[in-house]
Every structure is written in structure tokens, then in C-alpha cells.
Amino acid sequence: CVPDLLWQRRTYIVTIDLAVIGGSGLYKFPGLEHTERHALDTPYGPASGDVVVGDFAGRRVAFLARHGESHSLPPHRVNYRANLWALHSLGARRVIGVNAVGGIRTDMGPRVLVVPDQIIDYTHGRYTSYCDVDGAEVKHIDFSEPYTESLRRALITAAGQAGRAVIDGGCYGATQGPRLETRAEIARMKRDGCDLVGMTGMPEATLARELEIDYACLALVANFAAGCGDEAEISIEEIFAHLAAATAEVPAILAALLK
Ligand code: HPA
């Protein structure tokens, strides 16, 4: 799948203990100190923005805002391949994707944190693989378990140590966005077995697996998905208020993960 061997050899002398891809509501990593910025171009074009590398909890952490630092990239326009490639080329081998989601399951209401264990992909028209260069070897990855189980477990344990409640497991349904879903779409997703709905979980997880990066998702519930709560309509203001509250829990969990 690797399109350009030169890129493979481009190794940076940076040790990254953990990379974090921040979703809606997480555009800067609180507490990241002594930072340096890496503006990386990749064979797939530019990443969503600079990768900010700094010290956090005594470790080297890389942070990338998935939608850009000013939230200028909608989910279907995020260059997922460039983002994962940039983090990998900086030396990141463990990535936590922080994703805003809507809750479908009744116990997954606003401000709940979930570490999902399955995915159903409803997105379309996104670049989902590094294996699309003429003449390149086709690599079929096993994706039965789309997240790295050891990293999922470590995240759940860390949340416990930090005194933060998270739900272990759940199926993340990835939709195209940027609009929210209709009630009928959510009803179908529920029948399919989805517990959560978000717009950015895929193809990020697939691409991480292709690059052999350990990857887990920390999903922050911003609202009940369409038709799952009491409201007739979903308020975008409320989504961002709930997201801000849930996002505030993230640094403590990641600090425990890095211990
Ligand atoms: N649907 C899809 N993505 C989301 C939602 C939702 O209801 N809330 C936050 N991200």
C-alpha cells in the first residue's frame, strides 16, 4: 500500500507516547506544555492542521484537531489518510480518537463517555484505504475487532483510576454528515445494532489498522440521536454545551492512561 518509499524512510526523531485526535469541541489539548508544531504534508495532501507535540503527564503527546483548530473541516472533508499518515510519520504508534456522538441506547445520554468496541460504516465517498496506488500490493486487513483491544482496556482502566465513568463497549455507527440523521435513519441504525452515531469514526479506524497503529475511540455523547430523546428537535447549542462538559473529563483520563 505504501505509495512512496521515500516517505517510509522519513523518520522524525520524536518519541511520541500517545497521539490524540480531537473531535468537535476539542481543538487544543489542555495542559500540553513545551509544545512544538509540525506542519506536515503527506503523499495524501495536508493533514487537518499542525500536529502539536508537547509534554503532558510527564510524557510526549501529539495532538491533532480533526476538524482543524477553528473547526473549518466538516466530517466528509477531513483528510483522514493524511492525518493518520502525519501522526505515524512523527512516530505515533498509539492513537486515541476523541469523537462527539449522539446516543442511541437509552443509557447513552448526553455527557456519557463510551469506549465502543464495534463499528458499522454508513459513510460514502471517503478515501478509506492506503491501498489505491496503481501497482501497489493490496493489503486486506482483519477488521473483526475494529479497535485495538489492549488500548481499549487501558483506556477503560485509566478512566476508572481517574474516577470517571465510561461505558465499556457499544457499536459506533458512522454516518456521512454534516447533517444530523432523520428519525427513520436512526431507527434503522438501532435495528442494525448501533448504540451510538457519529460522523468521524470511519475511515479513521481502518486507516490506523492499515498503518498498524493501535487505535481506540473515546466517544463523548453530546445528545440523544434523532427520535431517541424527549425533544422534537436536536439543539446544536445544547450539543456544544454537553460536549464542553464531557470534553472536560478527557485530560484526566488520558493522564491516567499515560501513568
Ligand atoms: N449524529 C451524528 N453525529 C453526532 C451526533 C448525532 O446525533 N451528535 C454528535 N455527533
Image (tube, grey):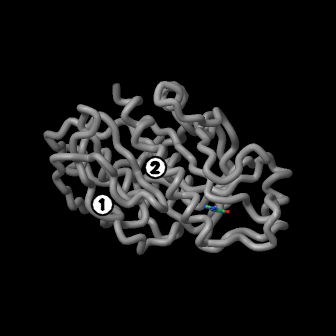
Residue 128 in the image: state x and y as whole percent: 52, 56
Question: Label 1 CB, ligand 1: below 8 Å?
Answer: no
Q: Given the image, on which type of amino acid does mark 2 rest? A: Ala
Mark linked to residue 137: none
Helix, strand or loop at label 2? It is loop
The residue labelled by disc 1 is 43
Q: Could you tell me how far apart the alpha carbons at marks 2 and 1 are, in whole angstroms? A: 35 Å
Residue drawn at 40 percent across, 42 percent down: 251
Residue 87 in the image: state x and y as whole percent: 31, 48
| Res 210 seen here | no
**Circles 2 and 1 in contact, beta carbons < 8 Å:** no
Residue drawn at 46 percent across, 61 percent down: 25
| Res 187 seen here | yes
Q: Given the image, on which type of amino acid does mark 1 rest? A: Pro
Residue drawn at 27 percent across, 53 percent down: 4
For ligand 1, the image quadrant comes to bottom right
Q: Is residue 30 left or right of residue 232?
A: left
Residue drawn at 63 percent across, 46 percent down: 112
Residue 145 in the image: state x and y as whole percent: 61, 34
The residue labelled by disc 2 is 248
Helix, strand or loop at label 1? It is loop
Up-down relation of residue 113 to residue 179 (above or below):
above
Front disc: 2 or 1: 2
The residue closer to the viewer here, 153 or 142, is 153
Residue 116 in the image: state x and y as whole percent: 62, 40
Give the quarter of the image for residue 179.
bottom right
The residue closer to the viewer here, 89 or 232, is 232
Up-down relation of residue 103 to residue 154 (above or below):
below
Q: Is residue 14 left or right of residue 136?
A: left
Precedes in sequence: disc 2 or disc 1: 1
